[in-house]
Amino acid sequence: MSRKIIIDTDPGQDDAVAILLALASPELEVLALTAVAGNVPLPLTQKNTRQIVELSGLKTPVYAGCDAPLKRKLVTAEYVHGKTGLDGIPLPDPTYPLQPQHAVDYIIDTLRAHAPGTITLCPLGPLTNIATAFQRAPDIIPKVAEIVLMGGGCFEGGNVTPAAEFNIYVDPEAADIVFKSGVPLVVMPLDVTHKALTSRAWVEGMRALGTPVGTAVASWTDFFERFDTAKYGSDGAPLHDPCVIAYLLEPSLFTGRHINVEIETGSELTLGMTVADWWRVSGREPNAMFMGGVDRDGFYRLLTERLGSL
Ligand code: RIB
Ligand code: CA
């Protein structure tokens, strides 16, 4: 029986690879993709999400959600993802339709319509849609099986400030709601994603597939890589969001600890920091499986196998 998931996303080249990985995996039933403002504004993240579905040839419904954080001005990341959010390869304007319902209402209605513990939420961007759904319909919170998200950092620090990772930084109040919700959490922080670095051989292997998906993934990765290799001097770029989907497919690729993680929402200096009690010194209740390691070769083997099937 495949696992029902809703992917909440702000494409973003790495979101795109994560979505394609999920759509290529029969173990997962992607009920829908819900777009949120993040890497680029909502009109672009919803358009990019539709383009990705169109590229996959599948018919997964796409919903548009919140266009701004709960309490703050939107911060975007065109400097990483380009002005479209999916720079790297020109894609035709999508003809694939956007669903008329607001993504938050879709999330609420869908969780209410399914048995408790049957739906996993997979946020790949700021947590605005998820937090808004929880605020508007607290009854759905105990019905969520698990939230597996990309966000935060511990020993790796932040990528948008010294203390904060982008997804959490954009909407720290939303992250605080999600991390305090009591829903079982699995967190893929920069400590993991910065070990999931692409390699030239892998990117060229994607290009060598000679398929529209392989060509797109190679082109997106080439574009996305330039920023991180310049910033970190690394050979390859961190494929952040696909770690969420890879965990659902092969959890043994990852290692981590069940610890307490809280979100800084007060200090301007450390706003959006995931305060991860890795050494369990706070006495606070553990609320998240916080990942720290990944089998990089296994991760890219899985990606090649699945993306090669589209
Ligand atoms: O910090 C990395 C995260 O921010 C990724 O999800 C990327 O797509 C951006 O949303
Ligand atoms: Ca993302």
Image: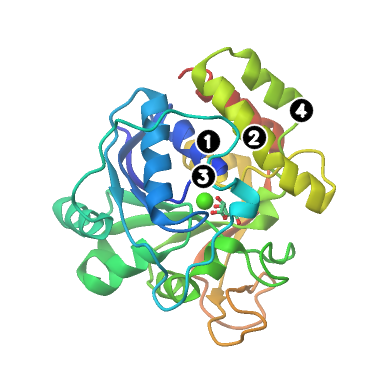
Give the mark nearer the N terminus: 2 vs 1: 1
Q: Within 8 Å of ligand 1, the CB of disc 4?
A: no
Mark 3 is on which residue type? Answer: Thr
For residue 75, above or below residue 215: below
Residue highlighted by disc 1: 17
- Judged by depth in the image, the label closer to the viewer, 3 or 4, is 3
Mark 1 is on which residue type? Answer: Val
Mark 4 is on which residue type? Answer: Arg
In three-dimensional space, the C-alpha distance between marks 2 and 1, rounded to whole angstroms, equals: 9 Å
Which residue does the image show at 42% across and 70% down from the upper left? 69
In three-dimensional space, the C-alpha distance between marks 3 and 1, rounded to whole angstroms, equals: 16 Å
Residue highlighted by disc 3: 84
Marks 1 and 4 close (CB-CB < 8 Å): no
Marks 3 and 1 close (CB-CB < 8 Å): no
Decide if residue 185 is on the left or right side of residue 103.
right
Task: Residue 142: name its quadrant.
Answer: bottom left
Residue 200's disc number: 4
Residue highlighted by disc 2: 221
